[in-house]
Amino acid sequence: MAFACAVCGKKRMVGNHVSHANNKTKRVFRPNLQTVRAVVNGATQRILACTRCIRSGLVTKA
């Protein structure tokens, strides 16, 4: 299971840490994924869903 939302497909984004001296090093923005027991095709299944999908009602909880 990849570290991505099973509903919307949101996954990590890459950016930079920027210091006061304007030095740039790579960093990773990770989505807030939660393990949820959801109804998928009529069956209960554990999925990784981002909090945006859970909160907006796109995930039907079991």
Image (tube, helix red, strand yellow):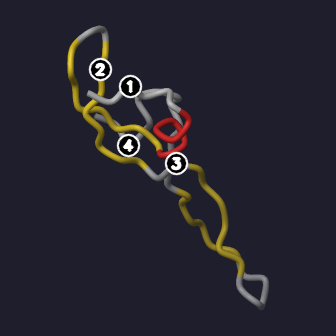
- Horizontally, residue 57 falls left or right of residue 22, namely left
Earlier residue among tags 2 and 3: 3
User: In the rendered image, which residue does mark 3 sit on?
Assistant: 12
- The label nearer to you, 4 versus 2, is 2
Q: Mark 4: which secondary structure?
A: loop
Please tell me whether mark 2 sits on a helix, a strand or a loop.
strand
> Looking at the image, is mark 1 or mark 2 earlier in the sequence?
2
Q: Position of residue 13 (x, y in %)?
A: 59, 50
Q: Is residue 60 left or right of residue 15?
A: left
- Mark 1 burial class by Cα count in 10 Å: few <14, some 14-19, many 20+: few
What amino acid type is highlighted by mark number 2? Val
Residue 29: image tag: none
Proximity of marks 1 and 2: CB atoms separated by less than 8 Å? yes
Q: Earlier in the sequence, mark 4 or mark 1?
A: 4
| C-alpha separation, residue under disc 1 versus residue under disc 3 | 24 Å
Q: Indicate which label's residue lies in the foreground, 1 or 3.
A: 1
Looking at the image, the residue that sits furthest to the bottom is 21
Question: Which residue has dot 4 on it?
Answer: 3
Contact between labelled residues 1 and 4, with CB atoms less than 8 Å apart: no
Give the Cα distance between marks 2 and 3.
Answer: 25 Å
The amino acid type, in three-letter code, at marker 3 is: Arg
